[in-house]
Amino acid sequence: MTFVENIFARLKKSATEPVLQEIHGEKIHSVTGSELLAITQQARNFLLARGLKKGDRCALLAPNRIRWAALDLALMAEGIVVVPLYARQAPAELVVMMQDSTPSRIICLDAAIAAEIKKLWPQAPQISLLEGVFAGEPSTPTPPMHHEDADVISIIYTSGTSGEPKGVILTAGNVDHIVAATNSRLDKLMGPRSQADRIFQYAPFCFAASWILLLTALSRHSVLALSTDLAKLADELKIAAPEYFLNVPTLLERVRARIQTTVQERGGLATAIFRRAQQAFVRRHNKQSKIGDFLWLALGNSLMFPAIRKSIGPNLKALICGSAPLGVETQLFFMMIGIPVLQVYGLTETTAICTADDPAHVEPGFVGPAIPGVEMKRADDGEILVRGPNIFAGYWQRPAETAKALQDGWFHTGDQGEPNASGNWRITGRIKNLIILNSGHNIAPEPIEEKLTQHLPEAQQVVLIGNQRSFLAALVTPNASNGANKLTEQQIQSAIETVNAAQPHYKQVRAFHVVPEPFTIESGLLTTMGKLKRDAITARFDAEIEALYQKKSS
């Protein structure tokens, strides 16, 4: 059976059990397996009545909701290609992707969005509102169509750190392989059990990793609770009480900073125990334990860590983290308090996943081994190459770019990395992000940026610059969540001096400029996945960068 057929079978088996939930304030709205099948059939009837058929494309523009999942299942069940789009993205950018994918129909959340699309694209195909898709009379659910491996399931647009986003074509064979792999890893995490997994989801389903988690959750005995208000994420987590959920490094970094600030503000014995336990844990990880470390860790484990775990999530067995490498210090922090962080590495082009931590063999700073059936190797320049059944079929209507990315059966990821003796991979940077000084030195900015942010919690982002210049400089933005803890030039200079002390001369940061506001998706300086648009940032602050180098050189 294909992953779609497996999901339908799982929903039928869970006919009277909740499978999806939406959190609204303090209330939870749930649907059972049979109820989800029923509203999925409503959506299928709507699609068929509008003449959509196998191979047609349908753009889906809405936030995470139960109805989003039902419509996604309906489209796949009828062989219609899903083009999921990010609801927070600028309308002009959305229209570009829609024009590129040429959908037969657009389905969006509300009339305001529909009007904006029509204004920007008068020739747009028919637009339907999500609510109307489910307005028809219920009918008996029917089995989904059977997909062959080569059948196109979805076209997901990449974030586009440089240039326009590209549509990544994912097939039934791609998704079948990855859903089987994620189920296998989760089976190792959860072990034999009769009760349903409790999962929480806040990352938008239009992102490949988030979508794969949705499909995995629907294909196993689980209940997936959906966030509906990111501003109330902490409260929603308490209500959902999940055993695991998908994260991005930014959120985990913020949780860690909040906990450390809270402990620091308490002062006294609590602060002393926490600080010394944390130092002891790091020394143990580095195999440099001292006499007395056991005592401090025992005190932390008995007096502090259980309460911290409970404040994050009382039932958490693990946090799953992807989209970018997580700082070692943050991963060690969560391990110390008793919540392992399992890292996953992949791209949209690899159906979200290439590697995944084995829950029994997690190495901080690494993203795990290649999943079964997937091969990975390191090119001469350090680039990671991947091949296997998870590799995408190509970029939509971009044969030249497809040929460039897929060479001799290997997908060129653009990422740099290396495996260790255990087969666990470490991601070190992006090939195209390399800064080449006019001295000829090649520098990956990410490791230095990571170290600076670790020493500068008052900063939201640090971006290294210096391509074809004589030295490195940095753009630094303030952390908007820090409140009264303002970012000062003295703090930045102190962090730079600390990091520079461990770097060779050509990797030392010689100047910096403070940008008043953090980079955001809305400003066009972050991708929809929260990654830096480095080209856009350097273009936006070209005058400030030029002035910075002229001042330093004068």
Image (spheres, rainbow, N blue to C red):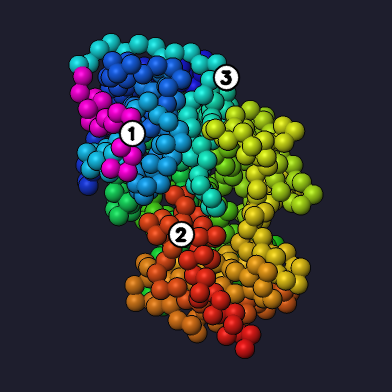
- Left or right of 385 in this view: 255: left
Residue 325 higher or lower than 127, as above or below: below
Query: Which region of the structure is painted magenta?
Result: 119-136
Asked if the residues shown at circle 2 and circle 3 are in contact, with their CB atoms under 8 angstroms apart, the answer is no
| Image depth: mark 2 or mark 3 in front | 2
**Disc assigned to residue 525:** 2
Closer to the N terminus: mark 2 or mark 3?
3
Residue 250 higher or lower than 227, as above or below: below
| Image depth: mark 2 or mark 1 in front | 1
Q: Secondary structure at mark 2?
A: loop
Q: What whole-number distance in Å separates the C-alpha atoms at marks 2 and 1?
A: 28 Å
- Left or right of 379 in this view: 337: left
Closer to the N terminus: mark 1 or mark 3?
1
| Horizontal and vertical percent position of residue 20 | 33, 32
Residue where numbered disc 3 is placed: 149
Q: Can residue 59 be seen at all in this image of the molecule? A: yes
Q: Secondary structure at mark 1?
A: loop
Q: Is residue 120 magenta?
A: yes
Residue where numbered disc 1 is placed: 124
| Horizontal and vertical percent position of residue 492 | 52, 79
